[in-house]
Image: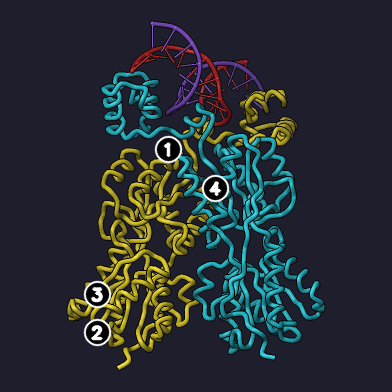
Chain colours: A cyan, B yellow, C purple, D red
Amino acid sequence: MEKFQPPTLEDVARKAAVSTATVSRCLSRPGTVRQATRERVMQVVSELGYTPNFGAQAMAARRTNTIGAVIPTMDNAIFAKGLQAFQEEISSRGASLLVASSSYKKDLEEKQIRALIARGVDALLLIGDDRDEEIYEYLAKRHIPYVLAWNHRKAASHTYVGFDNFQAAYAMAERVLQHGHRRIAMIAGITEGNDRAFDRRAGVRKALSDHGIADADFSVVECVYSIDAAGDAFETILGTGRRPTAVICGNDVLAAGAILRAKAMGISVPGGISVTGFDDIELSTVVDPGVTTVHVPHRRMGKTAATVLFSALKNRQPKSRKLETHIIERQSLAPPAS
Amino acid sequence: MEKFQPPTLEDVARKAAVSTATVSRCLSRPGTVRQATRERVMQVVSELGYTPNFGAQAMAARRTNTIGAVIPTMDNAIFAKGLQAFQEEISSRGASLLVASSSYKKDLEEKQIRALIARGVDALLLIGDDRDEEIYEYLAKRHIPYVLAWNHRKAASHTYVGFDNFQAAYAMAERVLQHGHRRIAMIAGITEGNDRAFDRRAGVRKALSDHGIADADFSVVECVYSIDAAGDAFETILGTGRRPTAVICGNDVLAAGAILRAKAMGISVPGGISVTGFDDIELSTVVDPGVTTVHVPHRRMGKTAATVLFSALKNRQPKSRKLETHIIERQSLAPPAS
DNA sequence: TTGTAGGCGTTATCAG
DNA sequence: CTGATAACGCCTACAA
């Protein structure tokens, strides 16, 4: 049997006894074609189940009206939420979104960026700024506008739409100190290739040293963003030197893992040990006790990123946007037992 | 300023002083080109930052090597997890994945399906089977292989890779009865346009009637998949007639919402009321008490779906696959107080 | 091993 | 309002 061929513009044109140009017009600017003609054409279109070939369309029109996004993983509520808002804004402007994920791997991310560009995306959303300079050069060479989200640094070379992870982590550490903690540990995300995790750790470290906490009273262990891994990290921490009275976690998933493990070990939270998170995802509301965390406006960030991208597409110089975060106190942070 | 033009195959060919055919070969089958030539070409490729135009490539080669998926939302761990596995399997076979989401809206789903097909996807993953017949006809007309996941029905007309939601819900309801409950309520997902939610509700209903529970002792309220909505639904249920001793929820998110609200209202779980979930996502481990739920092999389902799709692509007749589920007992379900 | 040339499905430009 | 026709960027016989 011969290989199946989808119907083309020409098939429609022939069957409707008009030219391909007319069919094309019916589809893109119905107003410019006579009612009778249009109806006949549309009839054939649906009979044949015709759908325009996107590749051909993009090639001829020289634009795709689609925006791309490369995120570390969809399996993290913060990206899922932010991207949802990003996508809503994009759709509302008549464009569409193409997403790819990198699993936090630099080389995979680069591959995905290229794939998205090959597919003709007009602009790009990327997470954070920790990637090879080469990629930025490529983007510049191709004149692809992009914004970096989920972080905000003062560097003038990029357009950021995010928040200051360093600052927010600094503030959280100070809050922990205010509660009277003096022996503190941190369960951080993997900082290699992740500027958000890196900045959060740096912020905590700086706050503690600014407030005179000795190095010996602060330990850090990195782990992947999973409940179990965080639990293990928690045990590791407890097994090393003097027990801290508070554990600052790089995000809410880590905090949930720490809390669960603490309870499993018979240590009450915050009675026996305090725990803090970061991101304010639903999870932090569900754990018992609720997690004291940093609220991040994920949805607003997604929406703003889209806005900035569209203005960049209109040749306007894109401008970085810094969003504010704030601490939400729940029950997982309290003064140390004494 | 003139509009920027990305470098093309021809640009590379010219600069490397070879034909476009040679450049094309270097990229797709490096083995067929002399070493020296190849090196020269690749050099130019990276100098120019050349990336092949996907649309043109697809058009000329008449295949894209990409598979599409339309899911209700990424903001639900079950899809995020299953899709991750789906995507891993696809990548491992050298193809790529294009995802779109429908927000549980039928018309949007149809639009997304068409968009994906316009983009040339070779095959499609869809969730459940509740959609207009017209769409299936369209798929057939275009000869696009597809599989329906997250549900399994006996209908021979489709290829399913999923589990029997009805059966699983039936089993869970029986389990609840075994614990001695006789007044039961259900917080179901929105069943309109969602065959999974529909079957779960139907399964529960059937089990209860099979076991002689009177209609008056069973009430159902539907609500969207959110913690808060589930909480509200829980209150609604408690405010109506005699209080049930157990609440069967359509998924774990609903269960978490119910448990949280119960505790907020001062009703202990399972002491004051029992709650069950469905899906076995991480959340059900995190809530206190842990949720008794139906374990679903999301990752395996994703992987299997990909396998089936690839075999369909090889002209093999795709065959439905039914996956098994089982109940995981945690603490949220216990015999009624009295 | 490399080059030539035709065709893939649309859009856009220009005449009628 | 409608119809020719030339791109668009790449692949792939087929030739050399």
Q: How far across and down, in percent of the image, does residue A303 sit?
A: 53, 51
Left or right, residue A92 beside residue A82? left
Residues beneath discs 4 and 1 located on the same chain: yes
Q: Kindly identify which residue carries mark 4.
A: B94
Mark 2: give few (<14), some (14-19) or many (20+) Cα within 10 Å: many
Secondary structure of residue under mark 4: loop
Q: Which amino acid type corresponds to the residue marked 4 in the rendered image?
A: Gly
The circle on residue B182 is 2
* Nearest the eye: B310 or A308: A308
Categorize mark 1 by other alpha carbons within 10 Å: few (<14), some (14-19), many (20+): some
The residue located at (57%, 75%) in the rendering is A291
> How many numbered marks appear?
4
Q: Look at the picture and state if B19 lies above or below B284.
A: above
Q: Say what amino acid the circle numbered 1 marks.
A: Ala
Q: Is A2 on the left-hand or right-hand side of A188?
A: left
Label 2 vs label 4: CA separation? 53 Å
Disc 4 sits on a residue from what chain?
Answer: B
